Image (spheres, rainbow, N blue to C red):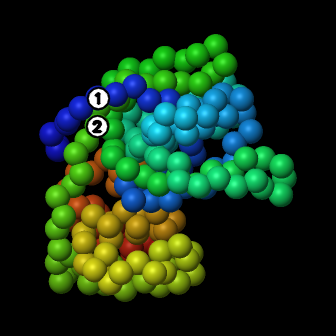
Amino acid sequence: MAAQISSLDVPLFPLGTVLYPGGQLQLRIFEPRYLDLVRECTTNGTEFGVCLILEGAEVGAPAQPAAIGTLARIVDFSHRADGLLGISAEGGNRFRVLRTRARPDGLVRGDVQLWPDEMPQPVPVEFALLQIILERLIETMGPHWRHAPRTAYEEAGWLGFRLAELLPLAREEQQQMLEMTDSLQRLAALRDILPRFQKA
C-alpha cells in the first residue's frame, strides 16, 4: 500500500457513487447541512470528502461512509431549474477516514489521512484495448472528457480511473478500483471484468 502523508479534518459527503482522482462530480444541494458544507468550503477555500455509502441513504439520518474516499474541490456553481443550488466539483487526493463524528444536524466530519498521488506510469501495450474502449465510452457517456489530450490516454492512472467511472461497475467494484494503489493492477482488473459486459 502507498505510504500515507498528512492528515486533516474535513466535512464528509456520503454518496451512492465513487469519486475518483481527477473525476468530475455534479451535485444538487438542498439539505441545510450540505448548504453549510458548501458555505464552509467556498469561504475557506477548502475541500470536502466524498465517500461511498455503505449503509444508509444520501438524505436523512447520517449514512455510514466507506473508509477510503476522495477529496473534492468546488469549481463551479449553478442555479438549477428546480430552484436548487448545483455545484460542480473535481476529485483530488484519496484519503483514509481515521474517525468520524456527526453534528446534531447530521453533517459528518472526519479526521482523514491523505494518500499521495500515484506515480505516473505509461500504459503497457497489453492494455491498448482499454484505450480504445475508453475512447468509445467517452464519445457516448463522457462528453466532458472529449477534449482530453492524447497523452492522457497514455497514463495508466488516468486511463484506469476514467474507465472505472464510465463502465457499469457494481458499487463494490467501483470502491475496489478506488482503493487499489497500483495503476497497472487496476488496469488488469478492469481488463478481466470486460468480458462480462461484452456478453451482455
- In this image, 57 relative to 108: left or right? right
Q: Residue at x 15, y 39 (%)?
A: 3
Q: Residue at x 17, y 78 (%)?
A: 124
The vertical placement of 35 against 27, above or below, is above
Q: Dot 2: what SS?
A: strand
For the residue pair 16 and 95, the one nearer the viewer reads as: 95
Please name the amino acid that badge 1 sits on: Ser
Q: CA distance from mark 1 to mark 2?
A: 6 Å
- Residue 160 place in picture, x, y as percent: 33, 66
Residue furthest to the top in view is: 104
- Residue 14 place in picture, x, y as percent: 54, 37
Among the 4 quarters of the image, the one containing residue 184: bottom left
Q: Residue at x 20, y 35 (%)?
A: 5
For the residue pair 18 and 54, the one nearer the viewer reads as: 18
Residue 12 seen in the figure:
no
Task: Please say if the residues under marks 1 and 2 sit with CB atoms less than 8 Å apart.
Answer: yes
The vertical placement of 194 against 73, above or below, is below
Residue furthest to the right in view is: 82
For the residue pair 78 and 172, the one nearer the viewer reads as: 78
Among the 4 quarters of the image, the one containing residue 76: bottom right
In the rendering, which numbered label is found on residue 114? 2
- Residue 141 place in picture, x, y as percent: 56, 75
- Residue 159 place in picture, x, y as percent: 33, 71
Residue that label 1 marks: 7
Label 1, residues with CA under 10 Å away: few <14, some 14-19, many ≥20: some
Residue furthest to the front in view is: 43
For the residue pair 190 and 7, the one nearer the viewer reads as: 7
Q: Please tell me how many numbered marks the rendered image carries.
A: 2
Please name the amino acid that badge 2 sits on: Leu
Q: Dot 1: what SS?
A: strand
The vertical placement of 152 against 107, above or below, is below
